[in-house]
């Protein structure tokens, strides 16, 4: 493809692509190619479709497309027929023929592949009618599951890079920052800092050389939103980064992606190459004078590297250890230069905000938390997967209305939000609205968006021990409270779980937890004791029961997991 | 995290590493260290000492610093791995769905502890915190320890297949043997 050298050329390309798409009347068979669906054979299914189409020479009659994660991972592999939006789940390779013949080419519906609502036993034909999708408000995920992540043309056709166009032609960098500040967008990486304010700091920081980093480390075990966005719509993040670079005056950017996400690394790599080939990355982008380029850095398996100063050390090729702040990265970051670090989901929110405006965005959500948040719904819930909801939605709505309730007719005991830095919210508080402040009040945090549902068979002391084991293992060892304190906490939790707990152990745990929080160097230690504190707060009796010698609750045998 | 280091080690062919380093197409700097180590580990399945010494000579990064970095990150190993690495997720979502029992069954079946390699050098068992497929836990991923060549950008579709990792979802202990079967003969 030829390099585009002007904004008009990009506009013309988009017009042409849209026209082509409009003229193309072929039905499309969309197969989910996310890591989740692939676990159940998504790629093999796609290949089966491809072989069939080739063998029967149906290229003129039907289009095939492989997309990123469509959300309802539990029911994968998923197939969606467009334009009708007939939705099939748990599709097998041998179903390919009938889907092509009966649905794609003849418009019929195959009953046995439809989703059955577990609460009403009704079969649902169209994706948008499934309760899982109905209650969502998809802004970031809007095109996940619709576009082919490996085709920049697909992204451009759905108005991709139009926000960049708008920023470059109609807005000054200051106006972009004002728009983002006015939208109320707060960082989705955990801390919830105002994105516009952070950009302002970096813009105002002295120095010509500035860096922008996309934090795709996603260390919270149980969270996979960022992976799905990177896999399913990498261009939306690249566009967000381009707009951020323009606003702050950054010339170089990095994608820091976990090594555990090979598909995300691959898709982002391809997307960067396509963007560069088209002239949207590099020197003098679209003739606007903007210079910006991107590089991928793969993580190497260290949770603490999600922390911004540790992440910077890791990109510099060092041990990923955090350092004290200030100076904040906005003043002195990568190689001592002003650096902005934003989370994947934060950046993916940028293009829609620039397109539709701050007013539109701040109209969604609550007073203090604007927009939507993606949650990775997992654990003992019927419909596991990715959900995007407006801020202010209650946890109960997510678990019961979208998630379909608890698997195997059990009862919900708690929801864990915020991963190793977060807390367990007991069933009494499930009506807590999801926003930064309300979650903090009940002892959890927004975190990055992991939401793990636990049923009544889960031992909460066991969960506390699990998280402390994780934190203790991932502590980088630089500061004493975190290195040694978490070890002592783990020892106490282990002895309680082993039936060797002592009178006073719970008080000791609380004291240690408070001290570690107050004195640790970085967010890992400052938040690591939270899961212990929140389980003590709400499930103190479980600690006491164990200490008094009652039998510990057993965690589930996995054999009956799948029988939802 | 404790890491084992080999005292004596089998000879390695440095040509592979030379090629990997050449593929950067530029003078390497300290910022590239982790990427080189990743390529080395992919090429040999572990970080051979001779390889690290070679990297030190090529990049002028002191060997001590290279070891410092390599010991920090969980991804790196200093001892040869089995032909296949089995990674079992013990992340939160998999944990609440019973990943513990899957680890136990894998350990029992293979006769090794988590982190170890079978005597016949066929399997290495590793536990990891989250593979990003939390919706389908417990998750087990099996792949070759040595990832030859295939760089991420030249495999347009199904690159994960090219990278050779197979994801297994909703793994129950009873399914462990079924999964291992696929790799025993090959
Ligand atoms: C221990 C620790 C782990 C973190 N892990 C992540 C992570 O995986 N992804 C992320 O985006 N932010 C993570 N953060 C937060 C980052 O330090 C930083 O605040 C964030 O990337 C800023 O982006 P945002 O303003 O867009 O949220 C972590 C923080 C700590 C203390
Ligand atoms: S917790 Fe196992 S894949 Fe995420």
Image (cartoon, coloured by chain):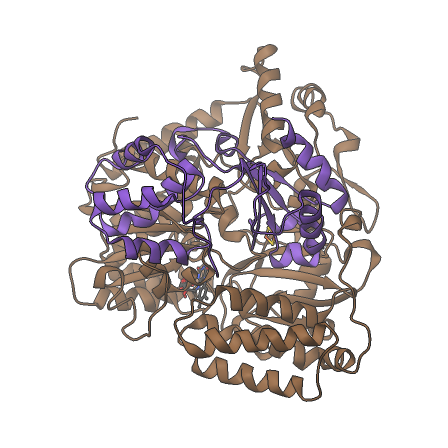
Chain colours: A brown, B purple
Residue in the foreground of this view, choosing between B39 and A312: B39
Q: Position of residue A296 (x, y in %)?
A: 35, 45
Note whether B62 is above or below A149 in the view shown: below
Instruction: Look at 53% across and 52% down and name the residue there.
Output: A225
Q: Classify residue B38 as left or right of residue A378.
A: left
Q: Quadrant of the C terminus of chain B?
A: top right
Residue B91 falls in image quadrant: bottom right
Q: Position of residue A404 (x, y in %)?
A: 74, 54
How many marks can you see? 0
Q: Classify residue A446 as left or right of residue A153.
A: right
Q: Position of residue A267 (x, y in %)?
A: 43, 38
Residue in the foreground of this view, choosing between A92 and A78: A92
Note whether B19 is above or below B175 in the view shown: above
From this viewpoint, is residue A390 visible?
Answer: yes
Q: Position of residue A200 (x, y in %)?
A: 28, 67
Extreme residue toward the top, this view: A56
Residue A535 falls in image quadrant: bottom right
Instruction: Look at 49% across and 76% down and name the residue there.
Output: A484
Instruction: Look at 61% across and 75% down and name the residue there.
Output: A491
Ligand 1 is located in which of the four quadrants?
Answer: bottom left
């Amino acid at each position: 493809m030829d390099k585009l050298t002007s904004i008009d050329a990009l506009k013309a390309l988009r017009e042409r692509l849209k026209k082509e798409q409009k003229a193309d009347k072929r039905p499309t068979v969309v197969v989910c190619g996310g890591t989740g669906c692939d676990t159940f054979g998504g790629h093999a299914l796609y290949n089966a479709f491809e072989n069939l189409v080739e063998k029967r020479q149906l290229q003129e009659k039907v289009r095939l497309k492989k997309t990123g994660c469509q959300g309802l991972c539990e029911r994968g592999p998923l197939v969606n027929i467009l334009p009708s939006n007939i939705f099939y789940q748990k599709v097998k390779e041998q179903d390919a023929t009938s889907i092509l013949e009966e649905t794609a080419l003849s418009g019929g519906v195959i009953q046995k592949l439809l989703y059955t609502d577990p609460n009403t036993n009704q079969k649902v034909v169209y994706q948008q009618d499934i309760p899982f999708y109905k209650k969502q408000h998809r802004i970031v995920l809007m095109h996940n599951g619709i576009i082919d992540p490996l085709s920049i043309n697909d992204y451009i056709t759905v108005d991709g890079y139009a926000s960049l166009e708008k920023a470059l032609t109609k807005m000054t960098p200051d106006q972009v920052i004002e728009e983002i500040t006015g939208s109320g967008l707060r960082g989705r990486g955990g801390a919830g800092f105002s994105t516009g304010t952070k950009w302002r700091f970096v813009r105002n920081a002295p120095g010509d050389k500035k860096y922008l980093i996309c934090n795709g480390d996603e260390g919270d075990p149980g969270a996979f939103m960022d992976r799905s966005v990177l896999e399913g719509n990498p261009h939306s993040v690249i566009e967000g980064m381009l707009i951020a670079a323009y606003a702050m005056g950054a010339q170089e950017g990095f994608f820091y992606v976990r090594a555990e996400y090979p598909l995300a690394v691959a898709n982002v790599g391809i997307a960067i190459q396509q963007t560069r080939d088209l002239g949207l990355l590099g020197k003098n982008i679209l003739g606007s004078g903007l210079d910006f380029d991107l590089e991928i850095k793969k993580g190497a398996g260290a949770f603490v590297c999600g922390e911004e100063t540790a992440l910077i050390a890791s990109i510099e090729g060092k041990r990923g250890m955090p350092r004290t702040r200030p100076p904040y990265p906005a003043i002195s970051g990568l190689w001592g230069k002003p650096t902005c670090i934003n989370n994947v989901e934060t950046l993916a929110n940028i293009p829609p905000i620039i397109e539709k405006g701050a007013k539109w965005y701040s109209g969604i959500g609550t007073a203090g938390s604007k927009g939507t948040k993606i949650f990775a719904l997992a654990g003992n819930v019927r419909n596991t997967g990715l959900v995007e909801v407006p801020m202010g939605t209650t946890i109960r709505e997510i678990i019961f209305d979208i998630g379909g309730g608890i698997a195997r007719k059990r009862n919900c005991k708690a929801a864990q939000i915020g991963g190793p830095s977060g807390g367990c919210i007991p069933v009494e508080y499930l009506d807590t609205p999801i926003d930064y402040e309300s979650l903090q009040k009940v002892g959890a945090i927004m975190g990055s968006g992991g939401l793990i549902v636990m049923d009544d068979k889960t031992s909460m002391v066991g969960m506390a021990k699990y998280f402390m084991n994780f934190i203790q293992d991932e502590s980088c060892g630089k500061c004493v409270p975190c290195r040694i304190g978490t070890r002592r906490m783990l020892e106490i939790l282990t002895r309680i779980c082993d039936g060797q707990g002592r009178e006073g152990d719970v008080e000791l745990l609380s004291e240690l937890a408070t001290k570690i929080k107050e004195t640790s160097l970085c967010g890992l230690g400052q938040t690591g004791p939270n899961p212990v504190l929140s389980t003590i707060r709400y499930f103190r009796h479980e600690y006491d029961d164990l200490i008094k010698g009652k039998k510990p609750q057993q965690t589930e045998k996995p054999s009956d997991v799948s029988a939802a | 995290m404790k890491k084992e280091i080999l005292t004596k080690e089998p000879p390695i062919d440095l040509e592979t590493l030379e090629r990997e380093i050449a593929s950067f197409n530029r003078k390497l700097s300290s910022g590239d260290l982790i990427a080189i180590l990743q390529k080395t580990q992919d090429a040999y399945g572990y970080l051979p000492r001779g390889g690290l010494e070679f990297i030190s000579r090529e990049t002028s990064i002191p060997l001590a610093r290279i070891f410092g970095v390599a010991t920090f990150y969980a991804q790196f190993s200093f001892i040869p791995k089995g032909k296949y690495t089995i990674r079992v997720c013990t992340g939160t979502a998999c944990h609440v769905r019973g990943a513990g029992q899957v680890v136990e069954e894998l350990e029992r079946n293979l006769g090794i502890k988590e982190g170890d390699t079978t005597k016949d050098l066929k399997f290495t068992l590793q536990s990891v915190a989250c593979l990003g497929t939390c919706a389908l836990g417990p998750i087990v991923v099996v792949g070759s320890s040595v990832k030859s060549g295939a760089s991420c950008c030249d495999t347009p579709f199904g690159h994960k297949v090219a990278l050779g990792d197979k994801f297994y979802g909703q793994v129950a202990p009873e399914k462990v043997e079924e999964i291992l079967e696929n790799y025993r003969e090959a």
